Image: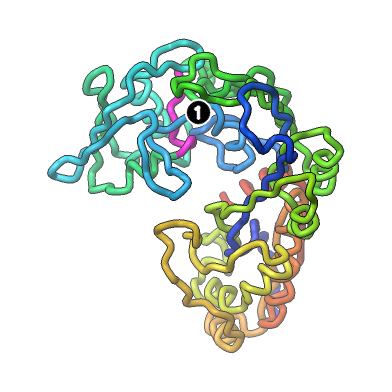
Amino acid sequence: MNRVKVIVPIIVLIALAVGVFLLPVSAQDAVSGGVLRAATDAEWTGLDPHVASTISSFVVIGNVVEGLTYLNDNMELEPLLAESWALSEDKLTWTFQLREGVTFSNGAPFNAESVVYSMNRCLDPATGSGRVSAVGGADAVWTAVDDYTVSVTTPSTDVTLPTQLAAASTGILHADSVTADGTVVIPIGTGPFVIEDLDGTTSVRLVRNPNYWQAGLPYLDEVDLTVIQEGAAREAALLGGEVDWIRFVDPPSLSALQSNSDVVVQVSPALAYHYIGMNLTREPFNDVRVRQAISFALDRQQICDAGAFGVCTPIQGPIDTGSPWYFDYAPYDQDLERARQLLAEAGFPDGFEMELMPTSTYQDSVRQAQVIQAQLAAIGITATINAPEWAEWLELEGNFLF
């Protein structure tokens, strides 16, 4: 057997995540005011919307920062900080008419200048943002046409730009959010909440933005968010009355909680996917045949059933079934003979060794890695599993990918 030791960061494969939310029954009727005690499942890894890359970060950021557009519950594009937009005849310039009368939580006015500042910050290589393509690409030029009109010109047609701006990750920051060294510790946005108290990466108090532009919102005066990483502990905190709402329920607990009359369980497509991440510049994963062999080795339904207890939908591409852009892309149904043939063609007839790296913070990823480990063994690939905690996983992922 060829001895090729490769670390593969893994968030696990092509299973549609399902968000599960719980609330005490007494909280079903909407009532303005009050404090929501909430628990989430993972520490945030920074609160800079233009740099953060984890869902755990946007659990916080999404309450503070808003984008020009947004996607409603039916995944339809709607105005938010921009009231309307239009594409030029040559299909190279988008023009956005901004909403007037909006202020940042610090009382400063929202206007074209603040939009151009935020977009240029995304484009600035010094920021290290992963949102460059989402704001038009490296050569995009954002311009303040007047106080409430902005335009962006791109080298080639970008018909999806308004949709890509429908996220806090391309949201509008006030310049005072950014420290002298270019980083953001506490973002200042136009969203419904303001960060009042931040305790590292495990606890934050969000209070109502007194300047919020949408009348009657938010309903709550305050959200106290804490991190409880272990699923059973989160559920115990909810059932014991220590918190009112929790994000993410471990799939094995779902049925029991759904039958509990004291809680309400809300299940919805997460508009996300789980995947195996590989560094394509490293051997043997720089060979497309190796990657294809791994794809043909996998039984995605088994990964879903055994790894996530069926609380997922097997897919073979990055667009999940809850999206209006979903299409039936499925060229990699399990085919072990084809997988072995591809490995032999790539020079690995006896397979090789690799390491899967889920994180112990997300036990579903560990269970799915175990299933993948067994499936890869069938084509001669020996996979070991290393499951560090979340903070170490993030550090290791960066080392392995670059």
Location of mark 1 (residue): 65
Q: Quadrant of residue 58?
A: top right
Query: In the rendered view, would you say 354 is above or below 132?
Result: below
Position of the N terminus by quadrant:
bottom right
Secondary structure beneath dot 1 equals loop
Q: Position of residue 181 (x, y in %)?
A: 54, 20
Q: Is residue 270 visible?
A: yes
Packing grade of label 1 (10 A; few <14, some 14-19, many >=20) is many
In the image, what residue occupies the spot 43% across and 16% down? 103
Q: Is residue 203 left or right of residue 336?
A: right
In the image, what residue occupies the spot 79% across and 45% down? 262
Is residue 171 inside the magenta stretch? yes
Q: Position of residue 236 (x, y in %)?
A: 85, 43
Span highlighted in magenta in the image: 167-174
- The three-letter code of the residue at mark 1 reads Val
**What residue occupies the far left of the structure in this picture?**
89
Query: In the rendered view, would you say 54 is above or below 334?
Result: above
Q: How is the image coloured?
A: rainbow
Give the overall secondary structure of the magenta segment: loop
In the image, what residue occupies the spot 31% across and 30% down? 83
Query: In the rendered view, would you say 199 is above or below 125?
Result: above
